[in-house]
Image (cartoon, grey):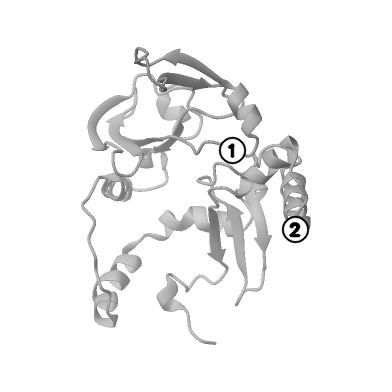
Amino acid sequence: MTAHETLPHRLESLEGFRVESVLNDGKESGVVALLGTFPGCATPAVVKLSRPPIPVGDPDALAAAVRLSERAPYSGMEYGYYHGVVDPAVMKSVSVDVLYPGCLAAETEEARAKLLNKHVSRNTAQAPKIFRETPASYASKHVPYMESIPTSALGWVYKILNKEKEVERLLYDDPDPTNGFLINVDPKWTTHPDTTKPGWREAVAAANENETRGTSATSATRANAAYANELYCLGLCHRRDVRSLRDLRGE
């Protein structure tokens, strides 16, 4: 099976990925972004590498999972310097996101190129800028940009709303067509229990109950409570004419 057939969601490694440029070295953001190509692929992909947050829900288990090797000679003072390797069962060493518009066979070449340019621009290191939005700038700049986004690029949104994808991540859904909305666990919420494993909802409920009662945490409940760290959710409204906060009205 070629890399093209496994992209972007069934890769076993990044072996063979040839880097064309480093979009972001991660010094400011903590996320390294690379532009390159996989073997057998005609178009580039963006690969993002980042360190997941250190899980402190069960600090005893965390400490027991770390193996050390000397990083610098002992200075004779109170400091010891080490490299640490953590058991993958406790903490993953790196999070990897692969963005490959070339897999969208139903899209035109122009549409795939536009998506790639969007991801390259979004993940390229840039100096921060402050922009004060006005009604005029919103109408002249933001609205045309939103209207230029092809409906096909929003297919993932509609699949989530229609319960065709990511049902296992669902936290809340109000199906009302006017005021209803849906909340999912975002993949960036790395400390949340694995939603592909049975029992994660019960683990979250138990942690919530423990926090509400104010009871002391055991190592097990600490591990469950760790889901609250790095809170990151995806919220989608069922109305399809709401494109941004600017479309919301008092009614």
What x and y, as percent, mark residue 250? 51, 86
Q: Is residue 32 visible?
A: yes
CA–CA distance between discs 1 and 2?
A: 20 Å
- Residue type of the residue flagged with mark 1: Val
Q: Residue at the spot x=63%, y=45% of the render? A: 227
- Residue type of the residue flagged with mark 2: Thr
Q: Residue at the front extreme?
A: 77
**Near-viewer residue (97 or 81):** 81
> In the picture provided, is 242 more to the left or to the right than 131?
right
- Classify 12 as above or below 105: above
Count of number-bearing discs:
2
**Near-viewer residue (52 or 121):** 52
Q: Residue at the spot x=76%, y=46% of the render? A: 216
> In the picture provided, is 128 more to the left or to the right than 115?
left
Mark 2 highlights which residue? 212
Q: Is residue 43 visible?
A: no
**Near-viewer residue (106 or 125):** 125
- Classify 20 as above or below 185: above
What x and y, as percent, mark residue 14? 40, 23
Please state, as top left, top right, bottom left or bottom right, where the C terminus lies in the image: bottom right
Q: Categorize mark 2 by other alpha carbons within 10 Å: few (<14), some (14-19), many (20+).
A: few
- Classify 171 as above or below 99: below
- Classify 162 as above or below 230: below
User: Mark 1: which secondary structure?
Assistant: loop
Q: Categorize mark 1 by other alpha carbons within 10 Å: few (<14), some (14-19), many (20+).
A: some
What x and y, as percent, mark residue 66? 55, 21
> In the picture provided, is 120 more to the left or to the right than 107?
left
Q: Quadrant of residue 129?
A: bottom left
Mark 1 highlights which residue? 56
Q: Mark 1 touching mark 2, by CB under 8 A?
A: no
